[in-house]
Amino acid sequence: MSVIEIDELTKQFGGVTAVDGLSLSVEEGEVFGFLGPNGAGKSTTINAMLDFTKPSSGEIRVFGRDANRESVAVRERAGLLLEGYGAYPRLTGREHVEHAIDTKDADDDPDALLDRVGLREAADRRAGGYSKGMRQRMALAVALVGDPDLLVLDEPSTGLDPNGARTLREVVTEEANRGATVFFSSHILEQVDAVADRIGILLDGSLAAVGEVGELQRELGAGATLSVWVSAVSDELLAGLREIAGVSEVRERHGRIEIACDGGGETKLRALNAIADAGVFEDFEVRDASLSDVFSKYTEGPA
Ligand SMILES: Nc1ncnc2c1ncn2[C@@H]1O[C@H](COP(=O)(O)OP(=O)(O)OP(=O)(O)O)[C@@H](O)[C@H]1O
């Protein structure tokens, strides 16, 4: 059964198209990593799923319910860690978790939850004195209250040190093993691919690729040339691409940018992000270095 079904979601803010005809479904028990650079539309999609923002067009169903008209029923079964989680500076970590337990009418042990996120020792300190990473750990504990059927985590690794990032991965895996569906966003590939079953790459409000982690890794990691269709090219963009670690050559041909990569998936993702950031991304494919590429490399000279 699909827990999340997004059908042709579009969201415009004035003249800005934040999400552009996005369709996506996430199955029960799946860990879905929603990957994309800053401004790709991840938070807007998540906010629309939870009825914190209204779609300009399109439909979203969560647990088979209309995300807009039945948002209360949706949120009751969801644990949320959203961007800019507003902590109450005067309340302690434990009090935040206790408040969430009361609100959800759950029977969790606050200390056990704080322990899971590595915040047990700081439980009685006021959240106003917490570091960014500690606030993020606390927000994760709050999201876990009531064993939600769906965890929605927007950039959960923000501010976390390597230990915190490991704790987050462990918690996501434990929740998935319990049977929860997990939908989480990130702009960093490594933080997603270790725990996700499937990944969707969002660029400029549209899904550029979606698939199983291994599949996408192979696609992004295997071939040597990333070929990207673009609506416009600038010298600045080409120069920026040449500076990415693992990029050996960049040239422009017939509305496409051809990027030869020695690096793996991370290099290609950085290149895709840079093109999306420039607002000119249309589509991409990854190809192995063929004899004709090698040939043209030596015959055509630099772009
Ligand atoms: N309330 C708003 N008013 C105007 N524009 C908005 C609003 N919310 C988002 N946008 C715009 O929509 C686009 C997508 O933003 P969104 O926050 O969804 O991206 P994101 O992928 O979550 O990025 P980040 O990783 O930086 O959080 C951006 O261009 C952003 O400026």
Image (cartoon, helix red, strand yellow):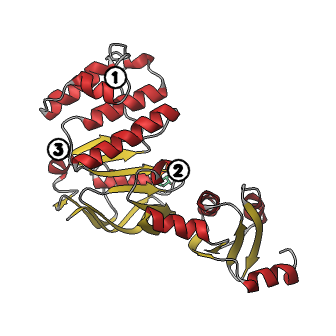
Residue depicted at x 44% and y 16%: 129
Does the residue at mark 3 contact the one at mark 1 (Cβ under 8 Å)? Answer: no
Residue 296 occupies quadrant: bottom right
Which of the two discs, 3 and 2, labels the residue nearer the N terminus?
Answer: 3
Q: Name the amino acid type tagged 2.
A: Glu
Along the polypeptide, which appears first: circle 3 or circle 1? 3
Q: Residue furthest bottom?
A: 292
Residue, disc 2: 190
The numbered disc on residue 37 is none
Secondary structure under badge 2? helix
Q: Is residue 169 above or below residue 297?
A: above
Lower position in the chain sequence, tag 1 or tag 2: 1
Callout 3–callout 2 Cβ contact below 8 Å:
no
Give the CA distance from mark 1 to mark 2. Answer: 31 Å
Horizontal and vertical percent position of residue 211: 42, 68
**Which of labels 3 and 2 is toward the front?**
2
Q: CA distance from mark 3 to mark 1?
A: 22 Å
Crowding at dot 1, Cα within 10 Å, few <14 / some 14-19 / many 20+, comes out as: few
Residue indicated by mark 1: 88
- Tell me the SS state at disc 1: loop
Which residue is depicted at the point 25% across and 56% down?
29
Residue 10, quarter of the rendered image:
bottom left
Q: Position of residue 91 (x, y in %)?
A: 31, 17
Query: Which residue matches tag 3?
Result: 76
Q: CA distance from mark 3 to mark 2?
A: 31 Å
The front one of 289 and 94 is: 289
Picture layout, residue 298 above or below residue 270 = below
